[in-house]
Image (cartoon, grey):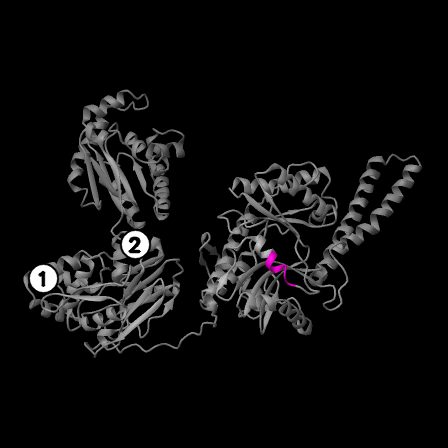
Amino acid sequence: MELKIPDLCLVVLVGASGSGKSTFARKHFLPTQVLSSDYFRGLVSDDENDQSASADAFEALHFVARKRLEAGRVTVIDATNVQPQDRAQLVEVAKRANVLPVAIVLDTPTEVCLARNAQRPDRDFGAHVVKRHRSALKRSLKFLGKEGFKRVHVLRSESDVDNSTIVYERLLNDLRHETGPFDVFGDVHGCRAELEELLAELGYTLVHDGEGRAVDAVPPGERKAVFVGDLVDRGPDTPGVLRLVMGMVAAGHALSVRGNHEEKLVRALRGHKVTVRHGLEKSLEQLAHEPEEFRLAATRFCDGLVAHYVLDGGNLVVAHAGLPERYHGRASAKVRSFALYGDTTGETDAHGLPVRLPWANDYRGSAMVLYGHVLVPEAEWINNTMCLETGVVFGGKLTALRYPERETVSVKAHQVWYESDAPFPQKAAERAPDVLALSDVTGLRRIETSLIGAVTIRAEQSASALEVMSRFAIDPHELLYLPPTMAPVATSQRDDVLEHPEEAFAEYRSGWVGQVICEEKHMGSRAVLSVRREGGAIYTRTGRAFFDGALGTELLDGVRTACAGLFDELATDWLLIDAELMPWNAKASGLIREQYAAVGAAAGGALPVAVDALSAAAARGVDVTDLLARTTQRASNAEAYSVAYERYCWPVDGLEGVRIAPFQLLAAEGRTFHDRSHLWHLETLGRLEGPLFQQTRHLVVDVNDPSQVAAGVRWWEELTAAGGEGMVVKPLANLAGRVQPGVKVRGREYLRIIYGPDYTTPSNLSRLRKRSLGRKRGLALREHALGIEALERLVRGEPLWRVHECVFGVLALESEPVDPRL
């Protein structure tokens, strides 16, 4: 016995105590899918049979059910559910999550339930309880469909229960397996001649019947037409449009969603009372001249259309009036209503038309949404959505979008077929692609990335970034990328160090990354080189110009000259390069003077004097042995501290002494390079020559080869012993799933600058080993994903605000309260 259920639904098990619900749930569903009332009683009261805890238990159960359903996961409720009021709450949970509720009833005979309960010591209630459950169940059976359950399966015997299987079915709107390419048509409204003309323009071959009527259109290649609904009403030939589209759908050459005009036409054809206006009168008049057989077929066709489709793996959604992301692939009256009518205020305008809310302005989903319904003068992109209703029936044009090419194709209306109830909308003043608006970056935002999905930016983070960006950042037209923060390696448990390469190699080994590249970590300031044949900028990781005035121009000119060969090699007029600019004091002299040098000077002035005084006291016979030892060690630590930061500073005069170490070529005209190995990046950028440039030493390590791992450790030890900051370990192939894009492994003496002169004492090291890295590592992943997304949008030629949304997001995340020493 096959029990067919949607692949996204709320399954409500219904049956008396002892009917076998829990056994059935264990057999057919994952443990994580099943929410048991007994289990939740135990959670809130430590006793699964404590009936007094039921109210709290079900409150918790309903909460978890909502969260699972919102996340798109099948959820099963294991409880008796024999009372209508209990089921009503679950139907409401499903309705709020916009999923279908399904009832599976275990109508197990009373004597079987009693026998099973008798074998369980925790079921010490009397037989009257089971009989009461069975009585309530019998009264409910014929009403389950009316309660809102879209499917009801009743298992009436032990044999039915034992021999049943669960079969998952796709929802009618789930066509993710249809990958296109598609041609998506706007509202046709009975304009058959224009539809035939647009089909021909797109390369479709019309097929005619014996009477010369178009009954199909064969697409070019593997393409398929998709109609956004409102095929009918207002225009001169609704039957002709239906005949053609019905033939295309039947032949597998087209898909169509339901429009509000099909909805009303079906009701009228089925004899329901409707107000005949807005062009319905024309459809009814035209269809009256068609044979009864055609009218019946047309009624069945329109009535069978679904409200929206999810196509191409979830990358494309087609709905007549559009659809917010939270409704994609869902099924409920609310979803259907939005897809047919959109979001309205409930008011009407001066022309008697509904006042609609501009849902697309707030859309931030990754799926492209194509729709019609709302008359627009031109099909334009709004946040990855496009309205294709360009008013052919009102004398405008019929528009189709080619997917995935993102190209629109239109044909003009042959005449005005129907006078609009409102003036034809005029095209609004276009927003230039490079114009930014405050609304692009303020408030709570969800930015979709191809790498890890949506990244949330809180309103307070946006406000913090806006302060920095508006006061200090370079021109946004040049600010096309911000580098992410970098996560430190997992804390080492070795006695003498806080960070060690072995943890980095182990991390990538556990993440199934075979080869890594170890890159020398330069102690300077992160720099993004935005280099053009004419113009450009060099800026910090917070978007500030590195040098102002003539010095900045001279630096950019020097970089541009060195990049001349790369411009020609890559056939591009611009490059984006990630680099480190040295020395440290070239940009951070104030920080060094006020934070580091001050500490070194104070310690260097006070501690040697203290050592001398304590030594004199010891010579007089005063027992200051421990204090003298500690102070002597602190003086040594302070000296090491000063040596450590001074190592990364050297004199600069203008650009003399300035060095740039480029390590990643981010993007060029029409392409990104994160699909190239880091070795390719270093070798390509290693060809930049001139006094400004310094190469980055590196070593490739197979993390599964102990000898290569040992060589990597030795290389790090040599770097740090010679005064180097340490190294960065990255997957050699560059992008490697959800692992860290790179981890920094800093040397013992460099960390003295970060954590203070005395951080190496055993007590301090022990405390620092408990540092929390989770937030920093999460931040690194999110910022990296936003950076990649910014680059991808840039090379696709998307408007500047779409690129800047990601760049701004990186800066906003930097306001996250994270230990800056990490």
Q: Can you say which quadrant of the picture contains the N terminus?
A: top left
Nearer the N terminus, badge 1 or badge 2?
Answer: 2
Query: Was residue 62 drawn as part of the magenta stretch in this picture?
Result: no
Location of residue 656 by image quarter: bottom right
Q: Which mark is residue 294?
A: 1
Whether residue 690 can be seen here: yes
Give the residue type that dot 2 points to: Glu
Question: Which residue is more in the foreground, 399 or 182?
Answer: 182
**Depicted 372 relative to depicted 147: above or below:** below
Tag 2 residue: 178
Question: Which residue is more in the foreground, 452 or 628?
Answer: 452
**Depicted 172 relative to depicted 192: above or below:** above
Can you name the residue that lies furthest to the right here?
620
Q: Which mark is residue 44?
A: none
Q: Residue at 71% of width from left, 60% of height from top?
A: 583
Q: In this rendering, would 574 be left or right of 393?
A: right
**Depicted 82 relative to depicted 647: above or below:** above
